[in-house]
Amino acid sequence: MLNDGHYNLTEMWREFRSLKFELNLPQMPTSFENWYSQLCSKVKAHRKTGPIRQQD
């Protein structure tokens, strides 16, 4: 995966896991890859539609 100034997936995953253990959160219902792709698509949609366009 190219590192173009954004987090790469491994770093994000490591950070997320350490945060999860710190907060003692339960296991996520969806896989991380699923969650990450949803996050990315929301960010892309947000960039296209502008600041005020709520989904969900």
Image: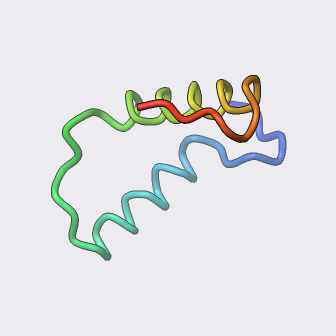
| Quarter of the rendering containing residue 52 | top right
Above or below 30: residue 7:
below
In this rendering, position of residue 33 left or right of residue 3? left
Percent x, y of residue 13: 46, 49
Residue at position x 37%, y 59% in the image: 17
Colour theme = rainbow
Nearer to us in this view, 24 or 55: 55
Left or right placement of residue 37 versus residue 22 in this view:
right
Q: Position of residue 40 (x, y in %)?
A: 58, 31
Q: Which residue is drawn at 38% across and 28% down?
A: 34
- Check the image and report above or below for 22 versus 4: below
Extreme-right residue of the structure: 4
**Position of the C terminus by quadrant:** top left
The residue lying toward the viewer, choosing from 22 and 48, is 48
Q: Position of residue 45 (x, y in %)?
A: 65, 24
Say whether residue 7 is left or right of residue 12. Answer: right
| Image x and y of residue 22, in percent | 32, 76
The quadrant of the image that shows the N terminus is: top right
As drawn, is 17 to the left or to the right of 3? Answer: left
The number of numbered badges drawn on the structure is: 0
Seen in the picture, residue 38 relative to 6 is either above or below; the reply is above
Nearer to us in this view, 37 or 15: 37
Please report the residue visible at 68 percent of the width from the left and 27 percent of the height from the top.
44
